[in-house]
Amino acid sequence: MINTRKQISTSILEAQDLFQDIFVPVNKRQGFIKSKSPNIPIYFYRYIGIIENSELYYENLHKLNNTLTSLGDLYINFTSGIPVKILSTSITEIPWTGLLGSDSTERNTLINILKTKGLFPEFNNNFFNDYIQNSFDETLALYLANEPNTTETVMKNFAIKLLGWTLDFAPKLFHSSNYNSRLETDIINPKVLFYGDIRKHEVYFLILLSKLSCDVIYINSMSDIEFSKIDKLNIHSKLIKLPKTQPLIDLNLKTTHNFKETIVDDTRNLKETVIKIEQPVIENRNLPSDIIFKDSINTLLKSSMNIFNDLILPVNKRIGFIGGSVPFIPVYFYRYIGIKENEDDYYNDLFRLDKSLSMFTGLYLKFTDSIPIRTAAKLITSTLNIWQHVDPFDASLTTKIATLLMEHKVFPTNNNTLNCSMANSFSYILDLYCKEEKNLNLSKVKNFSLKLLSWVHDFVPTLVKNFHFQDTSTDEIINPKIIYYGEIKKHELLFLIFLSKLGCDVLYINSLSDSFLDLTEYSDTFSKCFELPYKADLKAFPKEEKLIRKETIAASASRELSNSLYTDGDGFYRPWQFEEYKTQPVTLNTTFHEFKLLWNEPSSLRTGFRVENNTVYMPNLFAKISGVPNDLTLYWKDFFHLKSADNTLFIPGIPFTNITYSKTDLYSLAFVFDNNGFVDEKKLLTHSCYKFSYLKTSLQHIILEKINYFLKTDMLKKAIDKEFKLKILMTILNADKNILQLIQQYDYPSKIPKLLIYDNNESIFSDEDCIMLCFLNLFGFDIGILTPTGYNNIEGKIQEKFYDTHRLEEVNFNLPLPDFNDEKKYTKEKGKSFFSNIFNFK
């Protein structure tokens, strides 16, 4: 089969200034050829290590991200790996053998099948459908060349992951790309930034995107070990090696895709000089951050690794500060969202920060939940003659209003630079207000302007009185600090932005949510976010420091060492590391020989054990051994082997579950079920039949989760109606004390609790027995049922697909239990066992 697909040919350019060069339109790059099968010059760089000035390094990364964000859908970044996409299309009938074919014909056949099944994204531009299929083919071929001994399963998993990522990200990145347009316009190609450690499959996905014309930058301050293994000769990417290395830190690079209307749909109007601005573009023109009023303060939004410490740092000690007549002031504007695990620590941090900032006399303001408004009759009078000059009003008149305010000397200082800065900031805020306000008219603009001016008159004169930003001889220059704590309204947010543009540091604190995101789509344009791991309802701002226990240096070091040594995926676990995790059994399908071998193995050493997404997957056993071998000595040897295992509860006969509850108690449980037929945890915890309150809280939650999970399964053959649900719940609530002790002892990666049941007569398991067996199987127990008679005992109650049945060669109808005190009498070998002959098992 001849490949007639159109394809993109890419060539990697040498960058003189990478962070600027990637913004040059591709049609202005050397080597660009417009065609149905175009040649696209791209930049694909590994940016490894860190410069001497680490703060400047991270500041440059944030600036790069901010500028890239202005490209809207033409940009995507990854800072925590690439999330795996689960394919919704069935892949069971696809002939994956074509993946291992050395010639392209088999892969082309496979690609056509994948296309037919809708596993490639569909573009209106048919050429891009070809480009993606061809790049996918080339990436598979590259993987196969690098991994010549790979298996079909490995290749299949790789291909599925690659398809998922392509479906997830390609439509967004390339929906407006056209490299054969008849229009003579600038062409901006998509950009991809990957920060942090990278896995092998993710490297190949970046290579695939580069083959589709993306500029790609991979950033790692430590090394590029995985990348260099795949691209040893720097064929697919180029390397920039910085002078130092440093362990990776979390980098919050958020993207704002709300600018796509103006960037993606109108790339022909983008100029190289426009792209280089530091503020993202809004509706084809900048917010007035490029100074409109001469002599205004220039502010530089900075990133911080420790915002509480950095707020205290004098502005003249910050990188980028320039005093004098044309000042440049580095500022912090952070949203501090969420709460620490230790709530008292969190509120003590706020209290101490407030206390520290209060030392800056006149330079600190704190607002909690609102900014007070005072009607200023003088302001109404002084602005009375302004509004006629902007009537009728439209959004292009914002700068004119700011100019009129300057001319009428409305701003409340005598410092020309400050007044120009306030006019400039006012124009910026008014522009932003007009862009997001619905049903805009002059009355709304006037009311908002007067409110903003009222706050300016109330707070700004005091704030800037001791702000000596033009003094070049002072050792320490402290800029004003603003804290806003709690819920915030849109106009209050705009006032905070106004203050930031004057050189103030601003910290917005909310333990529950980031209100900015609900108020404006441009929150990441003027501020940065630091998000703590937990959320909690807002409380009053702390008025005193709380009494807490302080962790010692040794305890802290021990905890940090423990956290670094004991991770979810390294196979080395501390006791009770996962007691707060959810659990999921993975019941193994084994031979009888494997069943005996695995019986004593801890969970973490069994096939299928893993920890993912705060869930422990526990391989367990559930088997019935029906009959006996020819040599009973071997049977008793196996019996004692199973019975002697640690954490094993032996049950000598069935039924084994005692019914100790009354019908009144049983039916009283009907009130603890919700409308969907599941147990309501809060109701059950207060019910008189609930007797598990003494157990660890985490264990109680898991027991209740397993009960509800059980109610959803089809493990039991009997239909689970409302009455049977009551029996299930009551049976588990009345579990035997010995079983509860086994549950409490279960540390998931270690020794697995076990039930060994012996049934040598015509008895069968009761409903309650089977409920308990299913529940314990879901909890991760190993269960072995010895039935020398070969009779049915579990088959009529539990679905066969949930357990193994191992049939031995004979049955014995009168086989009493041995004397447990005389094991040797029963296990003395008379000859080689049946299993020894087959498996060489002793």
Image (cartoon, rainbow, N blue to C red):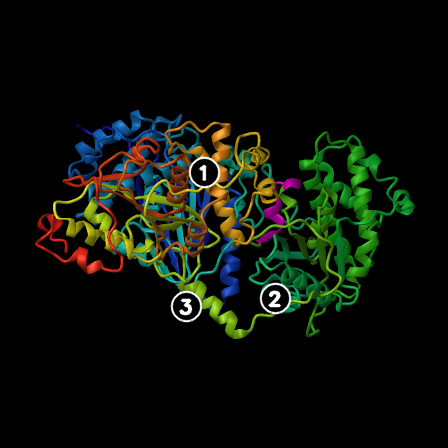
Label 3: element kind: loop
- What kind of residue is marked 3? Lys
Give SS at disc 1. helix
Picture quarter with the C terminus: bottom left
Residue 317 or residue 708, whichever sits in front: 708
**Residue 55 magenta-drawn?**
no
When the figure is inspected, residue 3 is found, relative to residue 570, above or below; the finding is above
Give the CA separation, mark 3 to mark 2.
22 Å
Q: Secondary structure at mark 2?
A: loop
Measured from the top left, where is residue 755 in percent x and y?
34, 48
Please identify the quarter of the rendering in which residue 741 is found. bottom left
Residue at screen point 65% across, 61% down? 344
Which comes before the other along the chain, label 3 or label 2? 3
Q: Position of residue 396 (x, y in %)?
A: 70, 36
Residue at point 72%, 29% (across, down) = 439
Is the residue marked by circle 2 packed among few (<14), some (14-19), or many (20+) residues within 10 Å? some
Camera-near label (1 vs 2) is 1
Question: Spatial distance from mark 3 to mark 1, Cα to Cα?
Answer: 52 Å
Residue 318's disc is: 2
Amino acid type of the residue that numbered disc 2 sits on in the rendered structure: Arg
| Range of magenta residues | 518-531
Q: Earlier in the sequence, mark 1 or mark 2?
A: 2
Q: Give the labeled residue for mark 3.
A: 244
Question: Residue 127, how many percent across, how many down?
Answer: 34, 29
Residue 709: mark? 1
**Residue 532 against residue 385 in the figure, above or below:** below
